[in-house]
Image: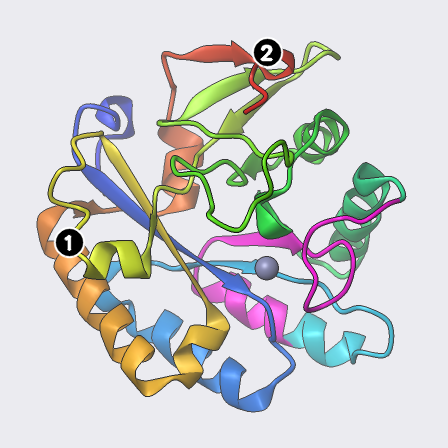
């Protein structure tokens, strides 16, 4: 394990997966096998979408406990529907609180949050901080599908976000998709931390799945593999910014 005190002076990498369809047996089998295998020596964080209405809660909880035993574990909220991640109304923060409480009641101990479609607003950030999670909803790139003006936090490197309540939220932005790694976009990336992500459903496609395994092996050679839990306990970003002034 790296000396976390120096974590921003090394060249580290972490990997997370947005686990969108944990109740699909084939998707889950492939994700569980990959998490077990630790490609590139990465303990892949499972950021899981909780069940929506009509989905099997008991099976979901059992699988989430398995994922938590294999690596870092977190909440990935889809606000509108399983296949529609960003909110379209209501109170986005309330759903995050509800899901965080539900996970805890189910005996789980999530430590991370990632908003579906990279959505994050002040209210959500407050709840995430209250729940004691670190946040991975920011990205260092602008997701191409976002409309101009859509809520999103763009950040180049890990930072403390100061919230209106006075709370501080550790933000560990996502920096690379697997496609970006595969296209060689790591080479010009000089920053201390690479945070790569993929979707569990990528594993259904043989070519994508092979690209993913290749990219993680490559990343593990180019960078020191660590994981989100290790970062959360050791990372002390020098940068602090006010969330209110960070709107991208
Ligand atoms: Zn998602």
Q: Quadrant of the C terminus?
A: top right
Query: Residue at horizontal 41%, vertical 42%?
Result: 174
Q: Is residue 40 visible?
A: no
The reply to whether the magenta stretch includes residue 69 is yes
Disc 1 designates what residue? 184
Q: Residue at x 61, y 75 (%)?
A: 21
* Category of crowding for the residue at label 2, using alpha-carbon neighbours closer than 10 angstroms: few (below 14), some (14–19), many (at least 20): few
Identify the magenta region: 63-89
Measured as percent of width and height from the top left, residue 20 is found at: 59, 68
Quadrant in the picture for the N terminus:
top left
- Look at mark 2 in the image and give the residue it sits on: 245
From the viewer's perspective, tell me whether residue 154 is left or right of residue 106: left
Q: Residues at badges 2 and 1 in contact (C-beta under 8 Å)? A: no
Element under label 2?
Answer: helix
Q: In the rendered image, is residue 127 in sight?
A: yes
Residue 80 position within the rendered picture, expressed as x and y whole percent measured from the top left: 78, 58
The front one of 170 and 205 is: 205
Mark 2 → mark 1, Cα distance in angstroms:
33 Å
Q: Is residue 40 above or below residue 194?
A: below
Q: Position of residue 38 (x, y in %)?
A: 29, 67
Residue shown at 73% from the left, 34% from the top: 124
């Amino acid at each position: 394990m790296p000396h976390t005190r120096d974590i921003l002076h090394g060249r580290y990498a972490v990997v997370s997966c947005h686990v969108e369809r944990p109740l699909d047996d084939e998707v889950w089998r492939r994700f569980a096998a990959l998490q077990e295998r630790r490609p590139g020596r990465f303990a892949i964080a499972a950021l899981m979408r909780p069940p929506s209405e009509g989905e099997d809660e008991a099976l979901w909880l059992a699988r989430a406990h398995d994922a938590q035993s294999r690596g870092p574990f977190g909440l990935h909220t889809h606000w509108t529907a399983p296949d529609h991640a960003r909110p379209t109304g209501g109170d986005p923060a309330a759903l995050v609180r509800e899901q965080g409480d539900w996970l805890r009641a189910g005996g789980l101990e999530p430590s991370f949050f990632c908003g579906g479609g990279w959505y994050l607003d002040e209210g959500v950030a407050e709840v995430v901080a209250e729940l004691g999670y670190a946040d991975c909803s920011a990205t260092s790139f602008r997701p191409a599908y976002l409309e101009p003006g859509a809520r999103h936090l763009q950040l180049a490197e890990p930072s403390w976000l100061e919230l209106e309540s006075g709370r501080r939220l550790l933000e560990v932005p996502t920096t690379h998709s697997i496609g970006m790694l595969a296209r060689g976009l790591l080479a010009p990336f000089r920053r201390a931390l690479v945070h790569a992500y993929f979707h569990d459903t990528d594993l259904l496609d043989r070519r994508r799945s092979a690209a993913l395994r290749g990219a993680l092996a490559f990343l593990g050679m180019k960078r020191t593999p660590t994981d989100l839990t290790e970062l959360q306990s050791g990372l002390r970003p020098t940068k602090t910014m006010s969330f209110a002034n960070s709107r991208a």
